[in-house]
C-alpha cells in the first residue's frame, strides 16, 4: 500500500473546486480503532491512512449526512463528495446509484483494492488494546502489528474479518481513481455460519434467533451503519401507523430484525457493517447473507456489481421460481 | 462503616443464601456481559471488567409498563412493585451513576417507579482492581473503590473478599450472613487501601474537567461540533449503554380493547427525539445532537444539580463503532476554550 | 387438548382474482373451513411483508396470500413482484425458525372457486399440523 500516493491523490482531489470534502480513514484515539476522517482541505491528508483496520464502510455517509433546506437567497452546495472505497464499499456505492439514492456524477470514487481487513475484536483477544492507537499493516498474506520497537506478524487466518473470508469482490467495482494494484480474489470458504443454522431443526433455529433477538437493545446502530438503510422516513420511526412498537421485547425485536433483513434482500452488498457495529453481538450478517445467497443462487443476481442494473425487488422475470406457490 | 471478611471457601454458601433474595449478577452471554438472575443452586464468578449493559437497566428497565387499561373498565391496573432485589458485583461507577440519576427522579416530581425500585434494591459493589482501558472515574469525581450509591462494597483480596458496610440495608445483609463472615483484621484494610491505590495508578486515560462546564456554553457555535459529529452514525449506543442517561419516552400500546401505557428508553442521538408534531426539528443534524449529549452531561446537569452527569465508565468511548471518544471530545473542548 | 385446535389464518386476497374466486366459492355454495379471515387488498403486489409479520405478532397461526395467475394481473405485473418478494420472505421466516407451513401463497383466479376451497383446506391443514403459534405474540411477550 502506497500511503504517499494515497495522500498525494487525496490532496489533489480535495483541492479541486468541484469537491466539497473527501471521506477517508484516520487512526483512532486508542487501541485498534480507526475513525472516519472528513477532509476539507489539503492539510487534512496527513492524517489519512489505509490499513487493515479501515473496515468501516464510508459509503454510508453519502446518505447519512443531513441535507438541510437551503436558506432563501443562498445557493445549494452542489459540489461532489470524494470517498475512499474498498471492494465491498464500492458495491454499496453502485447499489446506491442503481436505486437513485445518489447520482454517479455527485461522487468521486477513489478505489482501494483490498487485501482483507482485520476483525479488531479477534486481534484484541490475542493482543489487548492499549491507550495508544496501534499501527498495523499488511505483510504478504499476513498482518503486521507494530508496537514501538516490536513487530509482530499475525497470521491472516487468525484475525481476518468474517466478511472478508467470504468476500468475492475485493477490488472496487467502480472508481474514478484507483490506488494500488488490483488484488487477486482469494478462494472463498463456504458460509459456515449460515449453513450451520440451516442444518438445525426449525425449533432449534427459533431458539437460536430468540436468544439473539432478545439481546437487542434497539439502538438502531445496525440500521444507521448500513449504507443501504437510508429511507428518510423509516418505518421504525413511524408512529402512525405503528409497524413495530417502541417496546423492547422479543416480539417487537423480532419484527424489527425481520423487517431490517427483508428490506435489504437483493440489496445487501455484504459489507458486514450491521454486524460489526452491534454492541451486543447479534449475528445480523447471517440473515443478510442467507437472503443474498438465495438471490444469487436462485435468481442469478448479485447487487452492487453494475450501477446500470435494475433493482432486484423492483424487477422480475416471467420465469422466476414459483415452486412454493399453490 | 464496619468491615468483614468473607473467605472465598464460603463463597458458594454466601451466594446460596443471597440467591433466595432475587439475586442478579454479571454473566457472560455470548459476546456480551450483562446482569442476569442467579437461580438457586447456581454460583457466580466475579471477574474484572464491566458489563456492556449497565445495571441501570434493572432499576430503570428499557421498557416498563406504567399501567394497563381496557375499555369498559374505569380503573387502571398498576403493576405491583414489591419484589426486593439484590445486585451483586456492581462497579463503583455504575453505583455512583444511580446516585446521580436519583437527582433527576427526585427533582420536581418524585418518580414512584424508579424510587420504589431503588428502595427495594440492595447494591453489593465490587471495587475494581484492574480498571479497563477507557476507565476514567477519578477524572469525574469517582474512584475504583467509591462507595457512593452502594450498600456494601466488596474488594477482592485474593483469598477472600473484604465487605465494607455502607448503609443500613447493607448492614442487614451482613447481619444475615454473620455466620459466614469474620471481623476483618487491620492488615486486610491495609491491603484494600493498597489495591485501591494500585487501581488508581493503573488508570491510563483521563482528563481534568476543570473549566469544561463553564467553557461549553461559550463553544455553542464552535466548529468543533461539526468535526466531532461528522462520523457519528446517530445510533443509540452511547446513550442507551450510558449508566447516567435516563431519557425516556411514553407510549400507549393498544390491541383490541385493552392496552398499556409504558415508558421506554429514548436517546437524544435520535432525530425523532426532538421532532415536533409539525415536522420541524430544532436539532436537525447530528451536530446539534452530539453537542446536546456533551452539554447535558458536562454543563446542564452541573447547573441543575451541581455535579457532572458522567461517572467515567468509558462505555461510550469503548462501544462507539466510529471512535467518537468522550475523552477526546473533552480534550478538544478544553483546547478550543 | 381434547378439542381440535382451530387455527386463525389471515388471508390477503387480491381484489380482482382470488377475492372474486372466494366470492364465487360462496355463491356456488362450496363449503370450506371458516378459519380464514380475509383481508382484501388491491393486488398481491400490495402485500407488504410486514403485514405478514404483523399478523403473526397479533395472533395469526398462519398467513395465506393469494393473487392472480402470472400474466393475469389487473395491473399487468403486480403479482410478479409479489412472487419475488414473498419467496424471500418465506425463506427468511424459515431461516429464523418459523414453521414453513404457516406461510402459504397461491394463484387463484376469479373462476376457481373450487381451487380456493382446496387452497384454504391446505392452509388450514398445514396450520393445524404446525400447531398454535404464540411464541411471537405481542401481548403474551410484551404485556
Image: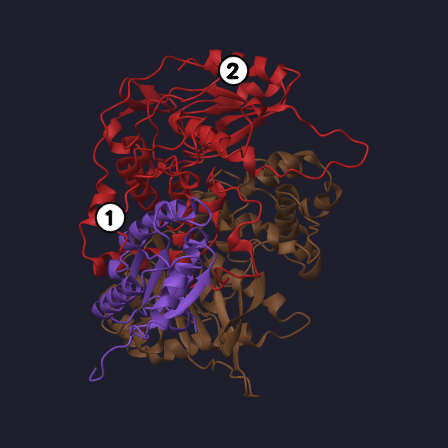
Chain colours: A red, B brown, C purple
> Do we see residue A127 in this rendering?
no
Distance Cα–Cα, label 1 vs label 2: 54 Å
Residue B93 picture location, percent across and down: 49, 57
Q: Which numbered marker is on residue B208?
A: none
Q: Which residue lies furthest to the right in this view?
A: A73
* Quadrant for the C terminus of chain B in the image: top right
Q: Which of C91 and A160 is in front in this view?
A: C91
Residue sitting at 77 percent across and 37 percent down? A71
Q: Are marks 1 and 2 on the same chain?
A: yes
The answer to whether residue A280 shows anywhere in this view is yes
Q: Which residue is labeled 2 in the image?
A: A7
Nearer to the camera, A4 or A84: A84
Q: Residue A289 or B63: which is nearer the viewer?
A: A289
Instruction: Answer with left or right where residue C14 lies relative to residue B45.
Output: right
Q: Residue at x 35, y 55 (%)?
A: B33
Q: Please, is residue B97 above or below residue B211 in the view? A: below
**Crowd band around label 2 with a 10 angstrom C-alpha radius: few (<14), some (14–19), many (20+):** some
Q: Is mark 1 on a helix, strand or loop?
A: loop
In percent of the image, x 44 and y 21: which residue is there?
Answer: A174
- The subunit letter for the residue under badge 1 reads A
Residue A60, how many percent across, how many down? 50, 35
Report which quarter residue B160 is drawn in: bottom left
Mark 1 vs mark 2: which is more N-terminal? 2
- The part of the image, by quadrant, that contains residue C16 is bottom left
Q: Name the residue under label 1.
A: A323
User: What secondary structure is marked by label 2?
Assistant: helix
Q: Which chain carries label 2?
A: A
Q: How many marks on residues? A: 2
Residue C28, how many percent across, how many down?
33, 71
Amino acid at each position: 500500500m502506497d500511503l504517499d500516493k494515497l495522500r498525494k491523490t487525496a490532496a489533489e482531489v480535495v483541492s479541486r473546486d468541484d469537491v466539497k470534502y473527501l471521506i477517508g480513514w484516520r487512526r483512532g484515539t486508542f487501541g485498534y480503532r480507526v475513525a472516519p476522517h472528513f477532509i476539507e482541505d489539503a492539510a487534512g491528508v496527513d492524517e489519512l491512512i489505509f490499513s487493515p483496520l479501515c473496515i468501516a464502510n464510508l459509503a454510508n455517509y453519502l446518505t447519512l449526512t443531513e441535507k438541510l433546506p437551503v436558506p432563501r437567497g443562498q445557493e445549494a452546495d452542489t459540489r461532489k463528495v470524494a470517498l475512499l472505497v474498498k471492494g465491498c464499499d464500492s458495491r454499496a456505492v453502485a447499489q446506491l446509484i442503481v436505486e437513485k439514492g445518489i447520482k454517479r456524477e455527485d461522487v468521486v470514487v477513489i478505489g482501494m483494492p483490498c487485501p482483507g481487513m482485520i476483525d479488531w475484536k479477534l486481534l484484541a483477544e490475542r493482543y489487548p488494546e492499549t491507550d495508544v492507537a496501534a499501527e498495523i499493516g499488511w505483510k504478504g498474506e499476513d498482518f503486521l502489528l507494530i508496537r514501538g520497537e516490536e513487530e509482530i506478524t499475525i497470521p491472516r487466518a487468525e484475525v481476518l474479518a468474517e466478511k472478508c473470508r467470504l468476500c468475492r469482490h475485493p477490488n472496487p467495482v467502480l472508481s474514478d481513481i484507483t490506488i494500488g494494484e488490483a488484488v487477486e480474489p482469494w478462494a472463498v470458504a463456504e458460509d459456515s455460519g449460515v449453513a450451520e443454522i440451516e442444518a438445525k431443526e426449525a425449533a432449534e433455529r427459533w431458539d437460536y434467533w430468540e436468544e439473539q433477538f432478545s439481546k437487542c437493545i434497539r439502538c438502531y446502530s445496525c440500521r444507521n451503519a448500513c449504507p443501504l438503510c437510508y429511507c428518510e422516513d423509516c418505518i421504525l420511526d413511524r408512529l402512525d401507523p405503528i409497524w413495530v412498537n417502541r417496546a423492547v421485547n422479543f416480539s417487537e425485536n423480532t419484527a424489527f430484525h425481520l423487517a431490517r433483513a427483508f428490506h435489504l434482500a437483493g440489496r445487501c452488498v455484504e459489507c458486514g457493517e450491521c454486524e460489526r457495529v452491534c454492541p451486543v453481538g447479534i449475528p445480523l450478517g447471517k440473515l443478510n447473507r442467507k437472503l443474498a445467497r438465495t438471490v444469487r443462487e436462485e435468481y442469478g443476481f448479485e447487487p452492487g456489481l453494475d450501477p446500470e442494473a435494475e433493482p432486484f425487488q423492483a424487477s422480475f422475470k416471467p420465469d422466476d421460481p414459483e415452486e412454493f406457490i399453490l | 462503616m464496619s468491615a468483614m471478611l468473607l473467605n472465598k471457601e464460603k463463597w458458594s454458601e454466601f451466594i446460596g443464601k443471597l440467591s433466595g433474595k432475587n439475586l442478579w449478577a454479571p454473566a457472560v452471554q455470548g459476546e456480551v456481559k450483562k446482569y442476569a438472575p442467579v437461580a438457586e443452586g447456581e454460583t457466580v464468578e466475579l471477574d474484572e471488567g464491566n458489563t456492556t449493559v449497565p445495571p441501570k437497566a434493572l432499576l430503570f428497565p428499557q421498557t416498563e409498563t406504567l399501567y394497563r387499561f381496557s375499555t369498559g373498565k374505569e380503573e387502571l391496573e398498576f403493576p405491583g412493585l414489591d419484589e426486593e432485589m439484590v445486585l451483586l458485583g456492581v462497579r463503583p461507577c455504575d453505583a455512583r451513576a444511580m446516585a446521580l440519576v436519583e437527582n433527576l427522579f427526585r427533582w420536581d416530581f418524585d418518580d414512584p417507579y424508579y424510587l420504589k425500585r431503588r428502595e427495594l434494591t440492595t447494591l453489593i459493589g465490587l471495587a475494581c482492581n484492574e480498571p479497563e482501558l477507557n476507565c476514567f472515574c477519578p477524572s469525574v469525581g469517582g474512584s475504583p473503590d467509591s462507595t457512593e450509591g452502594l450498600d456494601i462494597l466488596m474488594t477482592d483480596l485474593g483469598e477472600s473478599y473484604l465487605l465494607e458496610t455502607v448503609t443500613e440495608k447493607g448492614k442487614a445483609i451482613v447481619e444475615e450472613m454473620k455466620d459466614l463472615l469474620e471481623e476483618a483484621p487491620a492488615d486486610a484494610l491495609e491491603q484494600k487501601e493498597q489495591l485501591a491505590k494500585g487501581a488508581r495508578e493503573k488508570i491510563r486515560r483521563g482528563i481534568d474537567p476543570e473549566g469544561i462546564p463553564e467553557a461549553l456554553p461559550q463553544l455553542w457555535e464552535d466548529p468543533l461540533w461539526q468535526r466531532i459529529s461528522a462520523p457519528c452514525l446517530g445510533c443509540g449506543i452511547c446513550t442507551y449503554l450510558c449508566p447516567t442517561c435516563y431519557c425516556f419516552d411514553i407510549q400507549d400500546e393498544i390491541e383490541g380493547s385493552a392496552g398499556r401505557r409504558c415508558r421506554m428508553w429514548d436517546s437524544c442521538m435520535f432525530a425523532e427525539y426532538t421532532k415536533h408534531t409539525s415536522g420541524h426539528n430544532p436539532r436537525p443534524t447530528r451536530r446539534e445532537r452530539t453537542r446536546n449529549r456533551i452539554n447535558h452531561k458536562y454543563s446542564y446537569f452541573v447547573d441543575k444539580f451541581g455535579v457532572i452527569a458522567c461517572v467515567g465508565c468509558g462505555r461510550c468511548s469503548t462501544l462507539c463503532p466510529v471512535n467518537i471518544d468522550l475523552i477526546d471530545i473533552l480534550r478538544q473542548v478544553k483546547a478550543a476554550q | 387438548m381434547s378439542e381440535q385446535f382451530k387455527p386463525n389464518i389471515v388471508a390477503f386476497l387480491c381484489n380482482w382474482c382470488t377475492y372474486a374466486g372466494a366470492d364465487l366459492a360462496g355463491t356456488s355454495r362450496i363449503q370450506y373451513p371458516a378459519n380464514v379471515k380475509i383481508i382484501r387488498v388491491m393486488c398481491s403486489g400490495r402485500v407488504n411483508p410486514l403485514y405478514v409479520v404483523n399478523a403473526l405478532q397479533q395472533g395469526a397461526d398462519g398467513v395465506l396470500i393469494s393473487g392472480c395467475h402470472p400474466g393475469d394481473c389487473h395491473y399487468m405485473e403486480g403479482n410478479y413482484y409479489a412472487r419475488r418478494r414473498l419467496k424471500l420472505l418465506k425463506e427468511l421466516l424459515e431461516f429464523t425458525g418459523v414453521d414453513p407451513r404457516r406461510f402459504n401463497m397461491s394463484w387463484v383466479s376469479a373462476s376457481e372457486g373450487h381451487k380456493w376451497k382446496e387452497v384454504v383446506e391446505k392452509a388450514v391443514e398445514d396450520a393445524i399440523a404446525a400447531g398454535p403459534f404464540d411464541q411471537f405474540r405481542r401481548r403474551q411477550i410484551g404485556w
